[in-house]
Amino acid sequence: MFQLQENVERASCAYTCGSHCYTSSAVSAAQAEGYSLYKSGETLNDYPHVYHDYEGFDFSVSGTYYEFPILSDGAVYDGGSPGADRVIFNTADKLAGLITHTGASSSSGFVECT
């Protein structure tokens, strides 16, 4: 039964950042919180903030982009440690994708989540 549950959980991953699986509902929740803060001009520990895309990712939506933490424990970010993973959205609240510091060539760099 454990193996079946593990396979179901893997199948429900909308994105995988390093070894962390994110469901579409977790992505939506993080994006919604980040966009709500952006629209109200507020931040939590300096998030959301503009993501400059220095890495040159080929997002399917146009920018200006904002980054907001998505947490591997399933909680919505509330101002604590942001962890390594970010949800990227634009000013029209369109999801651009997820990125992570995990596996990047520098501590400030990012790679795309799959």
Image (cartoon, rainbow, N blue to C red):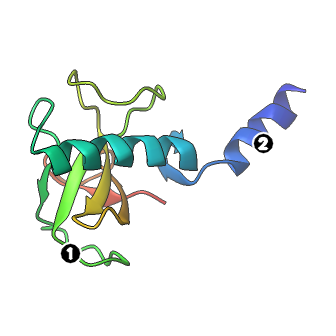
Residue type at mark 1: give it. Gly
Q: Tell me if mark 2 has few (under 14), some (14-19) or many (20+) residues whose alpha carbon lies within 10 angstroms of its own.
A: few
Where does the image place residue 65, in percent across and percent down from the top left?
A: 20, 64
Cα gap from disc 1 to disc 2, whole angstroms:
33 Å
Residue at x 42%, y 57% (from the top left corner): 113
Q: Which of 113 and 71 is in front in this view?
A: 71
Q: Is residue 54 visible?
A: yes
Does 73 appear above or below 37? above
* Residue beneath the point at 44% across and 32% down: 72
Q: Residue 4 carries which label?
A: none
Say which quadrant the N terminus sits in.
Answer: top right
Q: Look at 33% across and 77% down and name the residue there.
A: 61
Q: What residue type is labelled 2?
A: Asn
Asked if the residues shown at circle 1 and circle 2 are in contact, with their CB atoms under 8 angstroms apart, the answer is no
**Residue most extreme to the top:** 80
Q: Is mark 1 on a helix, strand or loop?
A: loop
Give the residue pinned by disc 1: 56
Q: Is residue 51 left or right of residue 18?
A: left
Looking at the image, is mark 1 or mark 2 earlier in the sequence?
2
The quadrant in which residue 41 appears is top left
Left or right: residue 114 versus residue 46 is right
Residue, disc 2: 7
For residue 66, which quarter of the picture? bottom left
Residue 87 in the image, given as x and y percentages of width and height = 33, 51
- Where does residue 108 sit, x and y in percent of width and height? 13, 48
In this picture, is 72 found above or below 103? above
